[in-house]
Amino acid sequence: MDNIFDNWRSLLEEYEKNLFSDKKDKRLQDWIQILTDLPSMRSSSVSFNNKVSVFGSWNGNDQQITNKLLLKLLPWRKGPFLIQDIFIDSEWKSDLKWTRFLDLGVNLLDKTILDVGSGNGYYAFRMLEQGAKNIICLEPNLNFYTQFLAMNHFFKVDNLRMIPERIESLKFSEHNFDVIFSMGLLYHQKDPSDHLKQLSLHLKSGGTLVIETIVIPPNHNEILTPEDRYANMPNVRFLHTEKGLDKLVEDEGFEIIGSSHPVATTIYEQRSTEWMPFRSFESAIQVNNPKLTVENLPAPSRKFLVLKK
């Protein structure tokens, strides 16, 4: 990764020398073995459109081996990916969300981008299609991080890297990035204002911040605080109305330069699959009233905000 900043380069080099650095997890050796055992693909070509894809040729039964190994990395939340004939049908049809982002017309050409809470990197791969120059992903979930390493084993992208850290754990703050993404994070934060402050510390003057989050109907004033779970999700701390979300970002000194209409999550966009065989959105909403969650709260709609500081 060329022309990247010194502090970030040091952090990247730490994880290039040792994929998991000093992280602790009982599954580490399993993940390392999966990455070690992944076959290579000959004469591969890649595409970063709706299905992030790679095509080439295998030796013998390498495709069957790859399919078996990738299934060991369940659950696959973001996607889809296509590795030759292996279709990773992820829980989320993430291409739908990305299409809604593209409709906003945000310019990613030649931009240096930070994707915070990036999951397995699906959206970051899509950013390459838009001509992004360099992309750094932050994703503390080591299973999702391993999924990214497995995908990049086949895609072999040099200007996209992932670091298994939270933005709050970084010991430096430099205004380096042209564009920063935070998608699906805000409602999990103990302090949404502090999350915006953390993102701002790494954004260039005049840079663009892209927020994607859940919004709820306006009859809840500005904020709803779930008592326990929300749509079967733990750690959902704050749900904003559009009015509350606008106030939050403006109070932190951001100007809203673009936004999308709220789009209700459906079981078409988020559902259980072979690659994510656990409970999904169908268990999060009421059978007879999909406008309400199983906790009797307003069902999630999602919205993008494009911000300038």
Image: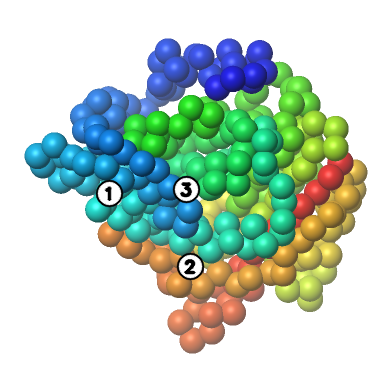
Say whether residue 237 is left or right of residue 240.
Answer: left
Q: In which quarter of the image is residue 104?
A: bottom right
Q: What element carries label 1?
A: loop
Whether 239 is drawn above or below 74: the answer is below
Number of the label disc, if any, that sits on residue 269: 2
The answer to the question of whether label 2 and label 3 lie on touching residues, with beta carbons closer than 8 A, is no
Q: Provide residue 209's location: percent of width, then percent of height.
A: 75, 44
The one nearer the camera, 102 or 280, is 102
Q: Provide residue 216's location: percent of width, then percent of height.
A: 70, 69
Q: Quadrant of residue 42?
A: top left
Q: What element carries label 2?
A: loop
Say whether residue 276 is left or right of residue 78.
Answer: left
Q: What residue type is labelled 1?
A: Gln
Q: Distance between the residues labelled 3 and 1?
A: 14 Å
Q: Which amino acid does label 3 sit on?
A: Phe
Residue linked to disc 1 = 84
Q: Provide residue 1's location: percent of width, then percent of height.
A: 55, 22
Rate crowding at label 1 as few (under 14), some (14 to 19) or many (20 or more) other CA atoms within 10 Å. Answer: some
Rate crowding at label 2 as few (under 14), some (14 to 19) or many (20 or more) other CA atoms within 10 Å. Answer: some
Q: How far apart are marks 2 and 1 (CA)?
A: 23 Å
Judge depth for marks 2 and 1 and give the one in front: 1
Name the residue rendered at 28%, 59% in the picture. Answer: 274
Name the residue rendered at 71%, 39% in the picture. Answer: 179
Does the rendering let one see residue 140?
yes
